[in-house]
Amino acid sequence: MGKVISLVNQKGGVGKTTTSINLSASLAVLGKKVLLIDLDPQGNTTTGIGIDKGDIDKSIYDVLTDKCSITEAIINTRYKRLSLLPATINLAGIDLEFLEKSKEAGFSKGKQLKIKLDPIKDQYDFIIIDCPPSLGLITTNALTASNSVIIPVQCEFFALEGIMQLLNTIMMAQKNLNPSLDIEGVLLTMLDSRTKLGFEVVEDIRKYFKERVYNTIIPRLIRLTESPSHGKPIIAYDPKSKGTEAYLNLAKEVIERNGTTN
């Protein structure tokens, strides 16, 4: 069965999109069939993987609003075993559309992504969902459709700020919409090895989340911030960089935690 994993944190700039792109690409390089879903209206995952938004005929918005089937909107990337369900700015209005439609009998505004995803999810080893930096209806749909979540946490002073709100949202989703939802792991990102503070944050996060924290830590690197502007994951942009090594190690951890082998 395909494993559906959402990357969630209501804080922006913590590495959700960078990780979505690079984890997906690394899983694909390691032999896994991967579907990457861009669920952020900004569409940064879409452009970061090398897709021109001007070339997109159908997107996740069209799927969620029944304008096309999910298979019609999925596109192949230039990377073997990696497909994308792209996003455009149209997605920004989906909350209001869902709230309006929820007046109709039988329409569940929190389950639309799950309904669309369930028939095709077993065609993939992993489905990675990049969520927007909010805890609104789009993220609720992702949590309902997912088996688990990865929480990227930036190695900075306010790292734990807002995490309790996020955990409460996850618990609410478990209680009301998706009882089997689990925390896949907590990923430490943007570690500046030159500062003592970064390592203190690492220690605090590990104390709090214990074995849920990945061994892999994503360093703060210029090459990692450059690669999306070139429409490439780091493994294609700079195969020998520390960023490539880090995301390959993360992908191996994800595979190992899920008990799958090539």
Image (cartoon, grey):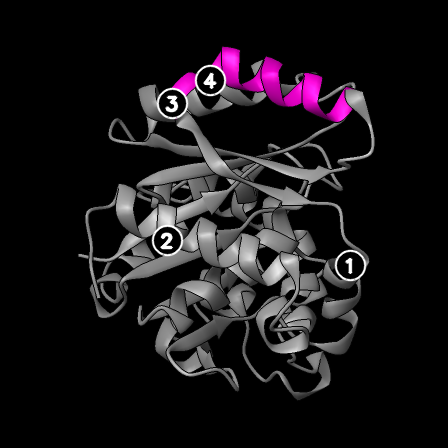
Q: Amino acid at mark 3?
A: Glu
Residue at x 76%, y 19% (from the top left corner)? 158
Q: Is residue 168 in view?
A: no
Q: Sequence-wise, which precedes: disc 1 or disc 2?
A: 1
User: Which residue position holds label 1?
Assistant: 225
Left or right: 152, with 141 as reference point: right
Q: Sequence-wise, which precedes: disc 2 or disc 4?
A: 4
On whether residue 208 falls in the magenta region, the answer is yes
On whether residue 136 falls in the magenta region, the answer is no
User: Which residue position holds label 4?
Assistant: 209
Marks 1 and 4 close (CB-CB < 8 Å): no
Marks 3 and 2 close (CB-CB < 8 Å): no
Name the element at disc 3. Answer: helix
Read off the magenta span: 197-211
Name the element at disc 4. Answer: helix
Q: Sequence-wise, which precedes: disc 1 or disc 3?
A: 3
Q: Position of residue 172 (x, y in %)?
A: 42, 19
**Neighbour tally class for label 4: few under 14, some 14-19, many 20 plus, Cα within 10 Å:** few
Left or right: 75, with 114 as reference point: right
Q: Position of residue 195 (x, y in %)?
A: 82, 28
Q: Position of residue 170 (x, y in %)?
A: 44, 25
Mark number displayed over residue 211? 3
User: Which residue position holds label 2?
Assistant: 252
